[in-house]
Every structure is written in structure tokens, then in C-alpha cells.
Amino acid sequence: MVLEVGRVEALFRYPVKSMAREGLEAATLGWHGIEGDRRLALRRMNDRSGFPWLSASQLPDLLLFTPHCPDDQPDEALPTYIRAPDGEQLSVFGEELAAEIGRRHGTVVQMTHLNRGIFDEAHISVIALDTVGEIGRMAGVIPDVRRFRPNVVVSLVRPAPFQEDEWVGGALSFGEGDDAPAITVTMRDERCSMVNLDPETARAAPEVLKAVVRANQNTAGIYGTVTRTGRLGVGQTILLRMASETRDRVTSRLKDK
């Protein structure tokens, strides 16, 4: 069964992990998520773990640094400079940016570029406006989708918070037709303290994460794996192919071989 579940309300990418987002009208969905998403990250040079990347969980001020590209560059180009909280423009790979963030965090950092991106769980994340609104209501704060750092924000056909949970195991396609970009919904998005951080000030409001825990077992939104590449755009219809039908199609393809 194929159901229309909503439309694309907004698209975001995060060129530098944990820094401010970039709003998009359209984007290319590749095998490793939205092109240009989380391709850069600050590495903690004294960290020998398997995940040495500095995030806003360790340094909330990262949210206040804004990546920028020159106006004449392609939409999917990586940023060339970062606007610091004081307005100063710093080169992405410059010593000044690394020194400023290292000073704030108290350790040596280095900007790193990974072609396939630096992700916590999966290449693309999706959340519905109703989910964000319910969490804001329960937490007593103004709903702000930026706290949840999604790639795709959904306006639902059938408004209901946490409806995304029902999509796990199914497939979402963005737009109509056999060539529409698509993802398989792999898991619910388990949240951490980053949702507490105000995107404008980086100040923490612990009641936000507490609301997520109370309302939906500490999850909000979903993660997905790309199964068909293509062009995403604000306003696209989002179709859900239910999990049982997804399995039937896979079985059919295997029999054909």
C-alpha cells in the first residue's frame, strides 16, 4: 500500500557538523545523504577514540558559528568561510578559526573534510512539524525545528505528533514517479542533550529533552538510508510504501533473478 503522508515543508543541510544550518529550496540527495551535508567537522586532536569530532554537546557555542559560500558558487558547494558569533569572517581551513574554537573548548582542533560525511547514525533525518510542536508544548518553549537538526521537515496530511514512528521499516519517496528520490526508514531518532540548546543563543533548556523522554521514549523523528538518488525540493509530495509491501517487492525482485 502506498500512502501520501505529507509534503516537504523545509530542507536543511549542515555543512560543518554542529554548526548552524543552511536552509535550501532544493538539494541533490546522493547515496551519502544531501550533497554537502556534514562533510566538514572539527577533529579534537588529542582524542584517540573512533569518533573524535567536536559537537555542540561538548561546545554549545558551535551553534553560533555560521558557514557561508560565495554567492557565485554552486548551491551544493562547501563553505569557504565561517561567520563567528562576533561577526568576524574566518576561513574554513584557516588557523584563526581553529584557534578560536580551540580556545573556547580548551583543546586543539583541526577542520577535516570527509567526502562521505560525518554522521551519528544515518545519512538523512526526517521530522514532522506536529512532532516539534508537541514537544514545544510539553516543554513550555516556543517550538523550533532547528533544535532537532533534521534534513527534511514534513507537513503531514494527517496531523499527529510522532507519526513518523509508524514509518519505520517502510520507504519514503519524495515526489511522484519511479525515479523519485527515496529512503528506507531504518530507525527512530534517539535524542541527546543537543535538543536543549537554543539555536540563537546556545543556552540550554533541559525541559526539552525531558519532554521528549516523557512523550515518546526519548525519540523524535526518524533516520533513513538512501535507496534512490535524485532531486529533493520544498513542496514535494511524500509517499510512504508500507513495510509489508516493501518486503514483497524485494522478494519479487529476487525471484526474477
Image (cartoon, rainbow, N blue to C red):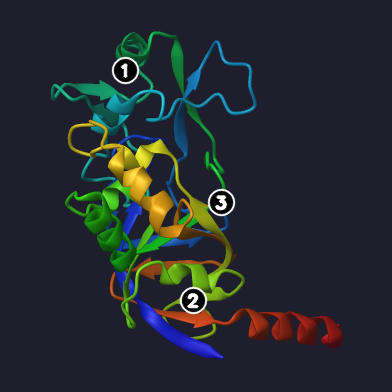
Q: Is residue 198 above or below residue 83?
A: below
Residue 11 visible to the viewer = yes
**Which residue is denoted by mark 2 in the rendering?**
173
Residue 92 lies, in percent from the top left, at 34, 26
Residue 25 visible to the viewer = no
Tell me the residue at 44%/15% (across/down).
109
The residues bearing labels 2 and 3 have C-alpha atoms spaced at a distance of 17 Å
- Kind of element beneath mark 2: strand
Q: Is residue 201 above or below residue 174?
A: above
Between marks 2 and 3 in the image, the one whose residue lies nearer the viewer: 3
Which image quadrant: the N terminus? bottom right
Between marks 2 and 1 in the image, the one whose residue lies nearer the viewer: 2
Please name the amino acid that badge 3 sits on.
Ala
Q: Earlier in the sequence, mark 2 or mark 1?
A: 1
Q: Return the mark for residue 221.
A: none
Tell me the residue at 46%/56% (across/down).
125
- Kind of element beneath mark 1: helix
Task: Tell me the crowding category of disc 2: few under 14, some 14 to 19, or many 20 or more residues within 10 angstroms, Cα based.
Answer: many
Q: Nearer the viewer, residue 114 or 106?
A: 106
**Which residue is denoted by mark 3 in the rendering?**
122
Q: Earlier in the sequence, mark 1 or mark 3?
A: 1
Tell me the residue at 31%/17% (across/down).
97
- Kind of element beneath mark 3: loop
Query: Position of 136 compared to 122: left or right?
Result: left
**Which residue is denoted by mark 1 in the rendering?**
97
The residues bearing labels 1 and 3 have C-alpha atoms spaced at a distance of 28 Å
Residue furthest to the front: 214
Tell me the residue at 24%/54% (across/down).
136
